[in-house]
Image (cartoon, rainbow, N blue to C red):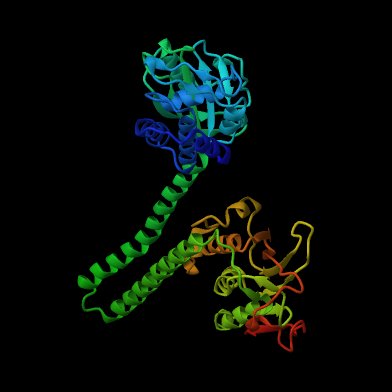
Amino acid sequence: MVAVMELWTQRGGRLGTAAAGIGAALLAQSAGWGQEGQVAAGLLTALVAAFGLPNAAAVRRAVVIAADRPAAQAGRTGRAEDGAAPYPLMEPGLGRAALDRLPMALLMINGHGMVIYANLAARALFERLREGEHYSMSFRAPDLLDALSESLAGAAPSSFDFTLHGDRSRVLSAHVDGGGAGAGAQPGGRRVLCLFQDRTQDMRHARMRTDFIANASHELRTPLSSIKGFIETLQGPARDDEAARERFLGIMQAQAERMQRLVDDLLSLNRIELNEHVAPTDLVDLGEIAHETAESLAPMAEERGTAITTDLPARGPRVRGDRDQLIQAIGNLLENGLKYGGDGPVELSRAPATPDHPGMVGLRVRDHGEGVPAEHIPRLTERFYRVSVKRSRSQGGTGLGLAIVKHILSRHRGELSIESTPGEGSSFTLWLPVERAGAPAAEDDAPGPDAGVPAPSHATGA
């Protein structure tokens, strides 16, 4: 893009508003591209300016000029239409190099249906694509083949989505422009410009959003319906039944608390996702955070007749992290162990270093519960996924705890590994990049007198 803009400056930067409007409409509005399309529009508009094209179809002609193999050396001029001033030809290879840098796939087909240019993105997208071959040899998508055939016959520009099948099916958006009915009479014959954008991830994210909204609505609807039913009962048959009223009010309170937990987790997940691309910069002590979190959950462990055992140094190691989020991640794993780990203790310890996690420190939470069948493990971090819906709800789970842990670790550039054996229990390990020795520390992060001193293994709770 820098090279194209420099060329634009050298040529005087003469760009009419009509040409700019056509470029923006063709690549940004008509095709509905996103940020990548805006980049492409900027590059192609710069090409138009470099050539000084005077009138309609400027963008398409700019690509034709840039993509066609140069017919002359730098400094020669091409013949303009309708007596307009001639336009300068681009230096050999510069136009193709500029188009090859476009992030979206672009190709050009001549009036005989031969592929005369395909940029790097197009060649990566369509493995069978070859310059110099007929387009029918490169594509197996009926919608695309029909659009190309119609465009060569003079049809108006078209935009559409289609599925590209292969080892991995992908959803693509296409914009096909052959210039319309009169374009075949222009010098050099008809040229059909094709632009493609891979929308597979966009479609997947759209499905995830739809599923998320549906699941969240369902999770809220159930307690709301329960509360509504009890209110109607209290207003009717149980109006004067004090025992029933006390029991129903207790159930209603539990359902309201369930909704509150769900809303809190949804808001928490949203906050984490908003900052997921921004890695934390604070130096925090992982051992200190782990001990603090375990101690805060001691009342919950005691209430359930079990304990949390810790086998960790009192201080260290240090990691770059968000203290509150790490407390939340460790707390979610410990709470899961207390809820689903049976009567045995929940163990919090350092995980042995592994070749799969170089430069990382592991914090392991192990329980001795029923375990999780292997087929469920890959989906445990999905939102609202539960191995047993009934059991999860009875324990007050929202189905979002492990999803929150996953996104917190993603922000910290860490990982979550899960191991489980049915009948024996489960292990959840947080892997975080460890801060190298000798890194500068803030005053508050300076190690205390007990830094590196192993803390005695002890239990919190019953």
Residue 86 to residue 29: above or below: above
Farthest residue to the bottom: give it: 449
Q: Nearer the viewer, residue 358 or 303?
A: 358
Residue depicted at 73% across the width and 78% down the height: 311
**Residue 181, can we see it?**
yes
Q: Nearer the viewer, residue 27 or 230?
A: 27
Residue depicted at 47% across the width and 38% down the height: 42
Judge left or right: residue 154 versus residue 370: left
Residue 223 to residue 151: above or below: below
Residue depicted at 55% across the width and 17% down the height: 135
Residue 90 to residue 110: above or below: below
Please state, as top left, top right, bottom left or bottom right, where the C terminus lies in the image.
bottom right
- In the rendered image, residue 106, in percent from the top left (x then y), is placed at 53, 29
User: Where, by quadrant of the figure, is residue 218 drawn?
Assistant: bottom left
Residue depicted at 45% across the width and 34% down the height: 45
Q: Nearer the viewer, residue 51 or 64?
A: 51
Judge left or right: residue 427 versus residue 214: right
User: Where, by quadrant of the figure, is residue 412 drawn?
Assistant: bottom right
Please state, as top left, top right, bottom left or bottom right, where the N terminus lies in the image.
top right
